[in-house]
Image: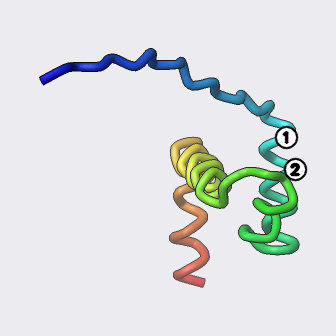
């Protein structure tokens, strides 16, 4: 049985600036995640990941009380 090896190419990753991410999330809020992803040429899951990361950062920066105030009011 012969074994063949294929050369593995490195995957290239695109780094997006914080400003680009903010604009992309703002666009997603306006026209929806799927439409924004199509327009920007990225996967919708990328927008969801960015949104989740922003929410986690807000929660850890002391805005977790915002949720409690909102639900109690």
The front one of 73 and 40 is 40
The quadrant the C terminus occupies is bottom right
Q: Quadrant of residue 65?
A: bottom right
Q: Which residue is mark 1?
A: 20
Q: Position of residue 44 (x, y in %)?
A: 66, 60
Q: Is residue 56 above or below residue 44?
A: above
Q: Quadrant of residue 30?
A: bottom right
The front one of 56 and 48 is 48
Q: Is residue 58 above or below residue 38?
A: above
The front one of 40 and 24 is 40
Residue beneath the point at 58% across and 42% down? 61
- Specify few, some or many for label 1: CA neighbours under 10 Å numbering under 14, 14-19, or 20 or more: few
Residue beneath the point at 53% across and 49% down? 56
Question: Which mark is on residue 49?
Answer: none
SS of the residue under disc 2: helix
Q: Are marks 2 and 1 in contact (CB under 8 Å)?
A: yes
SS of the residue under disc 1: helix
Q: Position of residue 32 (x, y in %)?
A: 78, 73
Q: Which residue is mark 2?
A: 23
In the drawing, does residue 6 fall left or right of residue 46? left
Q: CA distance from mark 2 to mark 1?
A: 5 Å
Residue beneath the point at 54% across and 81% down? 71
Residue beneath the point at 76% across and 60% down? 37
Q: Position of residue 52 (x, y in %)?
A: 57, 54
- Residue lying furthest left: 1
Q: Is residue 51 above or below residue 57?
A: below
């Amino acid at each position: 049985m012969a074994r063949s090896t294929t050369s593995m190419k490195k995957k290239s990753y695109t780094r997006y600036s914080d400003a680009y991410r903010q604009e992309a999330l703002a666009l997603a809020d306006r026209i929806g995640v799927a439409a924004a992803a199509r327009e920007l040429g990225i996967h919708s899951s990328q927008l969801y990941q960015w949104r989740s990361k922003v929410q986690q950062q807000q929660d850890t920066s002391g805005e977790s009380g915002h949720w409690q105030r909102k639900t109690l009011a």
